[in-house]
Amino acid sequence: MGYAWAKDLVHVPFGRVSLEGAKLSTRKGNVVLLEELLQKAIEKTLDIIREKNPDLENKEEVARQVGVGAVVFSDLSSARIKDVVFSWEEALNFEGETGPYVQYAHARACSVLRKANGGESIEGPDAPDESVAALLVHPAERATLRDLALLPERILQAQEKLEPSILARHLIDLAQSFNRFYHDCPILVAEADVRTARLALVKSVQLALRTGLGLLGVEAPERI
């Protein structure tokens, strides 16, 4: 049509999407409206929050962040050329390779930082430099540092290949390595220097997860 930007357009194919195994077809009337899908995700998430954390403040807002995030992350975490079968059970699983799992890891990091600051804020030490990183010698700490260092590269790969799943999968890897670090390495009760180094690692993970989720269009609640 003569537009100058036409040369920059790229066809991005993607696989077939089905809901709980049922093929979607507009011609046959078998469709799910996005608004209905998101609302159902929010309702299901709110039920989970009421069961697991009934004292959480702003339940409805957190349910919106997690419910919508679950749908978005579920879509973007699969290689786009592959067929996608959306499952409520899998998408809203806080223990699986899902958006809520990554969001929960972010909320966990925020919780550690708040406790370190007397429950007030999630500020933390600067990112580990060489001297601080030298104190992080546990295998779980090194694995978390490695996944942090790989994040910029994964972001560029996702951009160059038009494949957001590269970033989404790496955020899952980072959340998993952070959770192993959290369970294996005492943070708040460690010796002063090690405590500072581990808190710097926690803060770096918190920022990385928030940034990565944000690039995917997913919010990162501080409490879940």
Image (cartoon, rainbow, N blue to C red):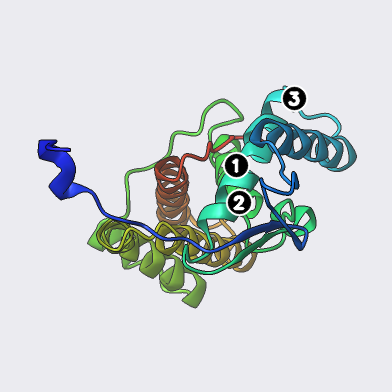
Q: Earlier in the sequence, mark 2 or mark 3?
A: 3
In the picture of the structure, the residue carrying the numbered disc 2 is 99
Front residue of 34/44: it is 34
In the picture of the structure, the residue carrying the numbered disc 1 is 69
Residue 23 visible to the viewer: yes
Which element is circle 1 on?
Answer: helix
In the picture of the structure, the residue carrying the numbered disc 3 is 60
Q: Is residue 165 left or right of residue 120?
A: left
Location of residue 163 with respect to 221 vertically, above or below: below
Q: Position of residue 12 (x, y in %)?
A: 36, 57
Q: Position of residue 18 (x, y in %)?
A: 69, 58
Q: CA distance from mark 3 to mark 1?
A: 14 Å
Location of residue 132 with respect to 8 vertically, above or below: below
Front residue of 59/107: it is 59
Task: Give the residue at x 69% y 63%.
Answer: 96
User: Which of the 4 image quarters holds residue 214?
Assistant: top left
Q: Earlier in the sequence, mark 2 or mark 1?
A: 1
**How packed is label 3: few (under 14 Cα within 10 Å), some, or many (20 or more)?**
some
Q: CA distance from mark 2 to mark 3?
A: 18 Å
Query: Which residue is most to the bottom?
Result: 139
Q: Are marks 2 and 1 in contact (CB under 8 Å)?
A: yes
Task: Give the residue at x 60% y 54%.
Answer: 74
Task: Give the residue at x 63% y 57%.
Answer: 98
Which element is circle 2 on?
Answer: helix
Amino acid carrying label 3: it is Glu
Location of residue 69 with respect to 157 vertically, above or below: above
Q: Is residue 10 left or right of residue 138?
A: left
